[in-house]
């Protein structure tokens, strides 16, 4: 059984990510969507929330598993017996970064190959950070995410607004 991993933070999963998953399932027998725990990115959703949202978005794809992971991606790949890492490339700037990562991963794990896939043209400009920005500014994110993720974004914005608007007491009790 050929296993591939499509890793990311998926904060949130976009229709572009989902397009990549749908393309990647044709390249392997088992696709693991690896949801990264630690990330230098400023994430909105907790790991548990991100895993749940990705599971919901990929529920109709029987060969897809969603698994959180921490640490080096190639070590995660070895744990799962994965032969391939799936990476999406939207633009030349993505390719430069992804090529560097692929070369480092090849040094760390020569037995794990990186496959680059391009999303469908209509998804080539979508990113999680742009979706979060549009949502935060009150824009319509419906064209970029599943309905469940759109609702989760609305709830998250409301939570963030409530947290921001909650008065805080100082350490001196004032």
Image: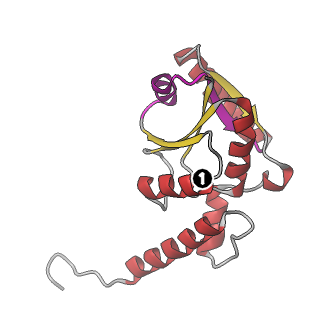
Task: Measuring from the top left, give residue 64's x and y in whole percent.
Answer: 60, 41
Q: Which of these two is toward me, 154 or 1?
A: 1
Residues shaded magenta? 71-90
Task: Measuring from the top left, give residue 149's x and y in whole percent.
Answer: 59, 65
In the picture, measured across the screen, residue 159 lies left or right of residue 172, that is: right
Secondary structure found at label 1: loop
Name the residue located 72 percent from the left edge and 44 percent from the top edge.
Answer: 22
Name the residue located 70 percent from the left edge and 37 percent from the top edge.
Answer: 25
Q: Is residue 84 magenta?
A: yes
Name the residue located 42 percent from the left edge and 33 percent from the top edge.
Answer: 71
Which of the 4 quarters of the picture holds residue 89? top right
Give neighbour class at mark 1: few <14, some 14-19, many 20+ (Cα, 10 Å): few
Can you identify the residue that label 1 sits on?
Answer: 59
**Position above or below: 81 against 39:** above
Q: Is residue 126 magenta?
A: no
Name the residue located 76 percent from the left edge and 36 percent from the top edge.
Answer: 117
Q: Which of these two is toward me, 67 or 137?
A: 67
Task: Measuring from the top left, give residue 123's x and y in whole percent.
Answer: 78, 54
Can residue 42 be seen here? The reply is: no
């Amino acid at each position: 059984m050929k296993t591939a991993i499509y890793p990311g933070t998926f904060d949130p999963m976009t229709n572009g990510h989902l397009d990549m998953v749908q393309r990647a399932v044709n390249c392997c027998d088992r696709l693991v969507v690896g949801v990264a725990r630690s990330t230098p990115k400023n994430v909105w959703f907790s790991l548990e929330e991100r895993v749940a949202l990705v599971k919901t978005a990929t529920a109709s794809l029987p060969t897809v598993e969603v698994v959180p992971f921490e640490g080096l991606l190639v070590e995660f790949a070895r744990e799962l017996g994965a032969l391939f890492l799936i990476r999406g490339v939207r633009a030349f700037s993505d390719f430069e970064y992804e090529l560097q990562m692929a070369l480092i991963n090849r040094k760390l794990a020569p037995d794990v190959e990186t496959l680059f896939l391009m999303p469908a043209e209509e998804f080539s400009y979508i990113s999680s950070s742009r979706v979060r920005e549009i949502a935060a500014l009150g824009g319509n994110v419906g064209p970029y995410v599943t309905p469940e993720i759109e609702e989760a974004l609305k709830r998250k914005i409301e939570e963030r607004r409530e947290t921001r608007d909650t008065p805080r007491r100082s350490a001196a009790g004032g």
